[in-house]
Image (tube, rainbow, N blue to C red):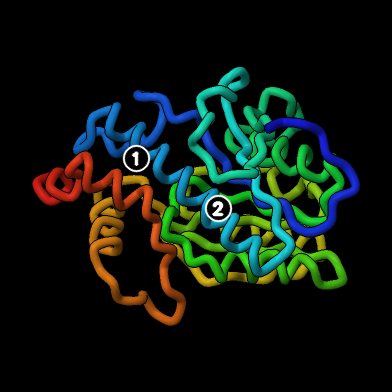
């Protein structure tokens, strides 16, 4: 759904996602996966992540979105997302600001679109962490519900971040960032400091974007034990996809 909304409360959480088409998503997993298997896995991630947001919404005032690209690909998400998940375009084409380039353009566009709908807070979430513990989403929304401006950052183990939450579309957070490097989270922390904004840092988590992390995901979903204090999200759609396509066998052989 893409209908405009205004006067909302709570926190919007949008998954940054490309339409899951073979050859365009999860390309770093090819090989060991085929383009079609990588696309199917990407679709299963989206299902689980949007279901995870819906689960978090039972404990906090959270509204789920997918910030998608490219333009015109809305139909590709039909039947793929958790019930009630809405769409906002975030292909970056509408952003032309010095210092904002690459993925930063899509992030800024998504943030601006969510705040334009009247939400007092918004989080942008990656599409690479299907087992992200649900309490981290609830914690992000709770931190943004407190009085005073702040940034919420969920650092990824590779130096990036899996989530950024704000109470306004602060342009400086997306300017002159070396995207897809191990410095993204640190540079974002510096931008927040320059804005005089405190940063609430969540527990770190991992992205599934290469064969090593895919092998880790397979092991995690095969185990019933908790990881540390916070239990991973069960990610049923991803677990089914892994089994159906026999992906654990492929990554173990790689």
Task: Decide which of 142, 98 is in the foreground and name it.
Answer: 142
Give the residue at the far top of this rendering.
72
- Residue at x 86% of width, y 46% of height: 118
- The local crowd at label 1, few if under 14, some if 14 to 19, many if 20 or more residues have their Cα within 10 Å, is many
Q: How many marks?
A: 2
Dot 1 corresponds to which residue?
A: 41
Left or right of 47 in this view: 220: left
Q: Position of residue 227 (x, y in %)?
A: 36, 75
Left or right of 36 in this view: 254: left
| Quadrant for the C terminus in the image | top left
Give the residue at the far bottom of this rendering.
229
Q: Position of residue 193 (x, y in %)?
A: 74, 64
Q: CA distance from mark 1 to mark 2?
A: 25 Å
| Quadrant for the N terminus in the image | top right
Give the residue at the far right of this rendering.
7
Judge depth for marks 1 and 2 and give the one in front. 1
Task: Decide which of 86, 12 is in the foreground and name it.
Answer: 86
Q: Position of residue 181 (x, y in %)?
A: 47, 48
* Residue 177 can be seen in this image: no
- Residue at x 72% of width, y 51% of height: 12
Vertical side of 239 occupied by 80: above or below: above
Q: At numbered mark 2, what does the secondary structure look like: helix, strand or loop?
A: helix
* Residue 77 can be seen in this image: yes
């Amino acid at each position: 759904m893409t209908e405009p909304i205004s006067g909302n409360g709570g926190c919007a959480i949008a998954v940054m996602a490309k339409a899951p088409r073979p050859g365009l998503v999860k390309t770093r997993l090819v090989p060991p996966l085929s383009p079609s298997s990588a696309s199917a896995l990407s679709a299963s991630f989206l299902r689980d992540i949007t279901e995870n947001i819906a689960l978090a919404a039972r404990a906090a005032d959270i509204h789920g979105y997918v910030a998608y690209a490219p333009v015109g690909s809305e139909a590709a998400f039909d039947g793929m997302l958790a019930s009630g998940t809405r769409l906002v375009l975030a292909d970056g084409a509408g952003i032309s600001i010095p210092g904002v380039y690459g993925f930063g353009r899509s992030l800024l566009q998504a943030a601006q679109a969510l705040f334009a709908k009247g939400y007092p807070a918004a989080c942008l979430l990656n599409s690479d962490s299907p087992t992200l513990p649900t309490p981290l989403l609830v914690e992000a929304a709770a931190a943004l519900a407190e009085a005073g401006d702040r940034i919420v950052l969920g650092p990824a183990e590779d130096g990036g971040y899996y989530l950024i939450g704000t109470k306004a579309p602060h342009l400086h957070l997306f300017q002159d960032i070396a995207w897809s490097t191990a410095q993204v989270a640190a540079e974002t922390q510096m931008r927040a400091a320059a804005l005089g904004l405190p940063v609430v840092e969540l527990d770190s988590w991992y992205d599934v974007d290469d064969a090593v992390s895919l092998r880790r995901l397979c092991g995690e979903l095969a185990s019933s034990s908790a990881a540390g204090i916070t239990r991973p999200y069960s990610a049923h759609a991803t677990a089914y996809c892994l089994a159906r396509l026999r992906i654990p066998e492929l990554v173990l052989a790689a």
